[in-house]
Amino acid sequence: MASDLADSIRQIVQDRGISEDLVKKTIEDFLLAAYKKKFGNMDNAVVQFSEDGLNVALFAKKSIVEDLYDPVSEIELEEALQYSDEAEIGDELMIEIEPSEFDRVAVQSAKQKARQTLKEITKDTLYSEFKEKEGEMIIGYYQRERNGNIFVDLGKMEGILPKKYQSPRESYRPNDRIKALIYDVNKTPAGLNVVLSRTHTDFVKRIFELEVPEIYDKTVEIFKLVREPGYRTKIAVYSNREDVDPVGACVGMKGVRIQSIVRELEGEKIDILKYDTDARSFIKNALSPAEVDQVIVLDEGKRQALAIVQESQLSLAIGKQGLNVRLANRLADWNIDVKTEEQFEEMDLSMDSKRAVSALFNDSDNEEITTISELPDIPQNIVEILVENGVELIETLVNLSDEELAGFEGLKEEDIEALKKVVSENLSIIEEEEAENSQDYPEDLDDEERESDSDTESDSESEVTSEESALVSEEPEVYECPDCGGDITLDMTICPNCGVGISFEFEEDE
């Protein structure tokens, strides 16, 4: 074989990215295919590489026999002695086959097979290499454009940046440097297809990982990222360390980091906000750069919320063509409606929503409680004793006397005192019925003064004529049942004594 075989192998390894072992295996298959084409059988063919890989040789292993029957696998002793003086019948002899012994057809057939094998190996090798890099960043150079799709030189092969995965802000010229995300790698009949993207959210994530070391080492993590390519990106981040500000880490000193990211995205706007487990706070942050006064949860099950902003902040919160609030919806995973205070007051909300809103705007954190178990600082054993005795509601409890409570088994005197203390500290009891039917009087008035005051008020509020008084005080007229003779009145339809049905008829006086 040619002495420059090692250089050829290294060149193939470098150009096609194929391992040296695979190249050697391909050369071996090439020689065996040529041997088979020449002799019809390759069972006795052996390919050997030198230790330094500089040379390769093809041998035919033949058995030494006295009478020759198969010239491909056997050799006579007389001929074998020409190769080795120590040859004996029954031995096996390795005879080197010179390439010149192969005819042109055999060589061409072997070369074709070798090329096909190398092509498949190259495709498989590159596929494995790029498939492992899916989702990673790669840098290439603009080669050409066809039907809006850009072909990018990636070194070992060519990638494609489809038009739908190009940002509307960007334009390229030949030999421009392009940084893109390896979005998809697949095999096609025409070869390997590596699809690149600059519009997917993972592309922005990889840029942040490159520019922000805290994100790369997981000190700061990205909770969620949403994007309208070419226009605006919203990214929610949080820190795994209390001493690291996640937003500040992404912005960098004097905004150096975020400016570098914006330049890579060709001026696309980026909102970096802090993730918050509280839905209201997170929604408020998601609507940045607008300032939100209040966030009201209208329906937690349907994840519907209302953001209240000042009139000057309304257009900023909604964004151009609703882009800002639309991205905030996707980021927070809530259906957010933005209103001013005037618009909110005109809304027709359900009673539950109004109650929630009223409590929110009144800065009231206290919710109405009805059961004893909801009272704060009440011992659990007291709650269990009361429940066993059928007392669960606070309304029932306040109507019980100390003697009735003392009758509950297991309830001690100190328990009753503790219970009364909790009730007095946390509840304001208003007896509505008494308030409606009574007048508030100073404590220093005696009973006669109150009675006199009540009489005066009664006289001033209403007057009853003597005729009305007579009608009110007149007793109903009594009649006699025609069946049993019992007393009946005009308002009766059945006699109370005998049960017979009755009706009254009156004749007009002539």
Image: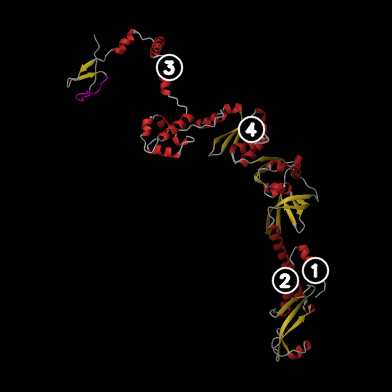
Q: Are marks 4 and 2 in contact (CB under 8 Å)?
A: no
Q: Position of residue 313 (x, y in %)?
A: 66, 30
- Quickly name the residue at label 1: 8
- Quickly name the residue at label 4: 292
Q: Do the residues labelled 2 and 3 touch (CB within 8 Å)?
A: no
Q: How crowded is mark 4: few (under 14 residues within 10 Å), some or many (20 or more)?
A: many
Q: Do the residues labelled 1 and 3 touch (CB within 8 Å)?
A: no
Q: Where is residue 427 in the image (x, y as percent from the top left)?
A: 47, 29
Q: Which residue is drawn at 65% across and 28% down?
A: 311
Instruction: Give the distance between the C-alpha atoms of the residues marked 1 and 3, in whole angstroms.
Output: 113 Å
Mark closer to the observer (2, 3): 3
- Quickly name the residue at label 3: 439
Q: Which quadrant would residue 347 be assigned to in this image?
A: top right
- What type is the residue that disc 3 sits on? Gln
Q: Which mark is first along the chain, 1 or 2?
A: 1
- What type is the residue that disc 2 sits on? Lys
Considering depth in this image, is 403 or 304 the residue closer to the camera? 403
Span highlighted in magenta in the image:
491-501
Q: Which mark is first along the chain, 3 or 4?
A: 4
Instruction: Give the distance between the C-alpha atoms of the residues marked 4 and 1, in whole angstroms.
Output: 69 Å
- Secondary structure of the residue carrying numbered label 1: helix
Q: Residue at x 64, y 37 (%)?
A: 285
Q: Which mark is first along the chain, 2 or 4?
A: 2
Residue 198 seen by the camera: no
Instruction: Give the distance between the C-alpha atoms of the residues marked 4 and 2, in whole angstroms.
Output: 69 Å
Q: How crowded is mark 1: few (under 14 residues within 10 Å), some or many (20 or more)?
A: some
- Secondary structure of the residue carrying numbered label 2: helix
- Quickly name the residue at label 2: 25
Seen in the image, is 340 located left or right of residue 156?
A: left
